[in-house]
């Protein structure tokens, strides 16, 4: 008979555990999507996230919508927003004006990214003439304009365009030298992938927080397709859990909740205390996972849709 694990040794079963969470949203394209976004923000805001980030489309395609969403978060909630910003298809002057507009709107945290090629993930990236060539240059530019908190990306399975893990970690260190204060990882499904990466970067002298990025699988085929494009591996066991459920959304949601809970609780039991969730503008799975982690809602004023 297998010996029972000592529950007292599991942080996930300890009372009064300290957990930090943050959430990513994307700016809505339609009135219906906007209502869905603000419903999700209203649901998750009482969890008092450390910050919420709002993405920025390639080539500034969502620039105005991102700014509008972030500004409304500042005006109408107590949440600290982080605005995404990329180098794609814009001059330094154009990007600098966006940074100053965020500062004027009360935003003090930017997620600085190079961004995907305008022709799509997988195609060659070309820096915009007169623009910031790399995310390191962008971090420099942001910090030159104001005393922003700057988060950057990290890749537990390395960036698809990086020649090696060492080159990838050197790129992260350059962003930190430029002023980055936090890194958020690309999503992953095998927790060992994250911990191996954490060991690598710590041995390389990287000491800033490296938040694990978690994506609750709302749609397996869609998530797996995106993972392939970004270099994130999809384990066979995960595919098998969703196998045969294409026409069974109710069971699919239950499986998704179980997978997210399993991953998050294992991360916690292995020492992780801060989690970043890619929400896809949907709150229920994220809210349930946060509840399992011990995060409880506080009373806050309602967010109107």
Image (cartoon, rainbow, N blue to C red):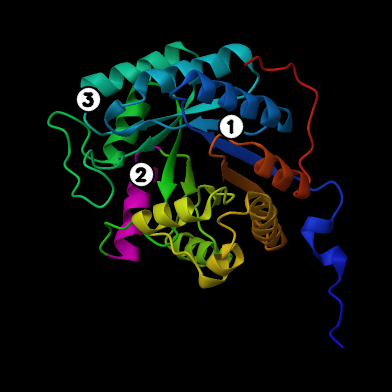
Rendered location of residue 114, percent (x, y): 30, 40
Task: Tell which of 114 and 232 is nearer to you.
Answer: 232
Task: Tell which of 183 and 58 is nearer to you.
Answer: 58
Check if mark 3's residue and mark 1's residue have beta carbons within 8 Å: no
Alpha carbon of mark 2 to alpha carbon of mark 3: how far? 17 Å
Rendered location of residue 222, percent (x, y): 46, 51
Alpha carbon of mark 3 to alpha carbon of mark 1: how far? 26 Å
Region in magenta:
164-179
Say which residue appears at 22% left-offset and 33% top-offset. Answer: 132
Q: Which residue reaches farthest bottom?
A: 1
Mark 2 sits on what residue? 175
Residue 168 magenta: yes
Considering the whole magenta stretch, tell me its main secondary structure.
Answer: helix
Mark found first going from the N terminus, 3 or 1: 1
User: Mark 2 or mark 3, which is nearer to you?
Assistant: 3
Mark 3 sits on what residue? 92
Q: Dot 1: what SS?
A: loop
Q: Quadrant of the N terminus?
A: bottom right
Q: Dot 2: what SS?
A: helix
Mark 1 sits on what residue? 51
Whether residue 192 is visible to the viewer of this picture, yes or no, is no
Corner quadrant of residue 136: top left
Residue 103 magenta: no
Rendered location of residue 211, percent (x, y): 55, 48
55 left or right of 34?
A: left
Mark found first going from the N terminus, 2 or 3: 3
Alpha carbon of mark 2 to alpha carbon of mark 1: how far? 20 Å
Rendered location of residue 5, percent (x, y): 84, 74
User: Mark 2 or mark 1, which is nearer to you?
Assistant: 1
106 left or right of 5?
A: left
124 left or right of 281?
A: left
């Amino acid at each position: 008979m297998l010996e029972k694990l000592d529950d007292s040794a599991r942080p996930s079963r300890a009372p009064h555990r300290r957990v930090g969470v943050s959430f990513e949203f994307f700016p809505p394209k339609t009135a219906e999507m906007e209502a869905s976004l603000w419903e999700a923000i209203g649901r998750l805001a009482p969890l008092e996230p450390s910050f919420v980030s709002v993405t920025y489309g390639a080539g500034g395609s969502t620039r105005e919508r991102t700014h509008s969403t972030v500004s409304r978060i500042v005006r109408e909630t107590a949440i600290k927003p982080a605005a995404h910003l990329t180098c794609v298809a814009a001059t330094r002057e154009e990007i600098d004006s966006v940074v100053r507009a965020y500062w004027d709107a009360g935003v003090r945290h930017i997620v600085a990214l190079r961004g995907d090629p305008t022709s799509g993930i997988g195609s060659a990236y070309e820096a915009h003439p007169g623009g910031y060539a790399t995310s390191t240059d962008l971090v420099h530019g942001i910090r030159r304009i104001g005393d922003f908190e700057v988060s950057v990306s990290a890749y537990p399975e390395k960036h698809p365009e990086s020649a090696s893990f060492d080159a990838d970690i050197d790129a992260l260190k350059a962003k930190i030298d430029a002023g980055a204060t936090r890194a958020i990882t690309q999503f992953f499904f095998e927790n060992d992938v994250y911990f191996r990466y954490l060991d690598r970067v710590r041995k390389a002298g990287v000491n800033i927080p490296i938040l694990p990025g978690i994506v609750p699988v709302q749609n397996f085929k869609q998530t797996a397709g995106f993972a392939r494009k970004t270099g994130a591996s999809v384990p066979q066991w995960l595919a098998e859990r969703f196998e045969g459920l294409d026409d069974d959304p109710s069971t699919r949601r239950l499986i998704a909740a179980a997978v997210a809970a399993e991953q998050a609780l294992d991360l916690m039991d292995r020492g992780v205390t801060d989690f970043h969730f890619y929400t896809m503008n949907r709150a229920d799975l994220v809210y349930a996972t946060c509840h399992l982690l011990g995060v409880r809602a506080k009373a806050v004023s309602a967010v109107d849709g």
